[in-house]
Image (cartoon, rainbow, N blue to C red):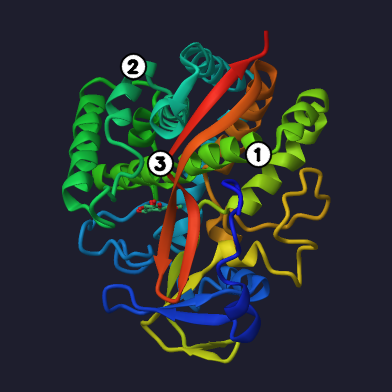
Amino acid sequence: MGVSDFPDAFKDTRATKGVCPFNDQNDSVAMLLRFKDVRKSAHDYKSFISGAQPGRIVVPSEVNIRDTRQIPFEVDPPEHTEYRALVEDWFKRPLDAAYEAGLEAIIAAELDRVLVKGRIEAIAELSLPIQSRALTLLLNIPMKEAETWISWGTHVFRSEDSDLDGDKAAILYDYIDAEIDKLIANPDDSLYGVLLQSEYQGRKMTKEEVKGVLILTFAGGRDTIINYLTNTLAYLAEHPEAITELRDNPELLNTAIEELVRYFSPLTHMGRVVAQEKEVSGHVAKEDTRVSLCWASANRDEAIFENPNAVVLDRKMNPHVAFGFGTHKCLGATHARQLMKVFLRVFTQKVAKLTVVKAVENIEDWGEHQRKVGFDSLEIELNPIK
Ligand code: EMZ
């Protein structure tokens, strides 16, 4: 198996059963594996709710390490609709030319820096700094702020030793609390400032609500973007022809980023709490139990995708659910897509050759299923275009 192969961990169970139980801290989750079930259940927000106890829809559950509700992610309609409308335009800013130019400058500078070094560990020295610096654009705050976040590592709720790290979560919470207090004293046009001025149901957003949006902004697009970038590097190293193809045919970038995100599916799944008993593929989802929408499995469903385990950079029909589906589809997707596109464009313009020196895989453990989601480390060597 190549370093850039990401096998379909759910193939057999998806075909035979469609649903698989997973014991998460004694709050069992029935993982829904088929594309159609995943989409239908994602759509059915009345039966499968997100507005449960904060942290419970995440797998592994975060109920023991946080009690702030992430907004709009852990709220259902009708409240969800108003919260989402408050932030929707802000999260479309990545489409502005100036934003795209900002991303390009960040990515070009990071690549220039590592091209001088030649050999690097891709996560710490490239993917994490790009993700963090790009986040300053989304928040509209000075670039230097990213240095603090880079020091936090890949995940804000998990660490090397533990899947759930309350001490680490506390660092993010204290940081956001302090930032909100600063902004209350000195309002500005950052996401913090804009949210503090926003009105929900005819009154100002509370500090706790503002914090809820910010935690989601920090946590939701962190390990996912980092894994996407690192996995893309592994792919390009093993498919040098793709570097040339993308460089020569920039119109391929749009389908290429969708295909890579389908193939990698950086977020394996997201849970829901059952509010009304429902049967899905023979599984009776009982009230107050959990199900999860397994995006990673749905994205390899052979009933939908031809040749699902191949990366086809110009794939035409690609209704993937890597960014979720329905009411809660990823708010940060515009930012992520723009970042992925600019990254591929700048990378192929600057890099002639890329080699993997050493890879340590990151394998997630979902009971019966082990899924490769990315790398714990990826040492690479880069050669610039002369
Ligand atoms: C939550 C989640 C959002 C969760 C779209 O995903 O991302 C996870 O990484 C966090 O742990 O709290 O923000």
* Residue 18: x %, y % from top left: 59, 81
Q: Residue drawn 67% across and 64% down?
A: 300
What residue sits right under mark 2 in the picture? 144
Task: Determine if residue 1 is in view.
Answer: yes
* Residue 26: x %, y % from top left: 27, 79
- Amino acid type assigned to the residue bearing label 1 in the image: Glu
137 relative to 261, above or below? above
Work out whether residue 184 or residue 24 is closer to the camera in this orientation and state it: 24
- Amino acid type assigned to the residue bearing label 3 in the image: Thr
Discs 1/2, front: 1
What residue sits right under mark 1 in the picture? 238
Discs 1/3, front: 1
* Residue 232: x %, y % from top left: 59, 39
- Amino acid type assigned to the residue bearing label 2 in the image: Lys
Judge: label 1 CB < 8 Å from ligand 1: no
Question: Circle 2 — which element?
Answer: helix
What residue sits right under mark 3 in the picture? 217
Q: Quadrant of residue 304?
A: bottom right
Q: Residue drawn 31% across and 30% down?
A: 149
In this picture, residue 251 sits left or right of residue 266: right
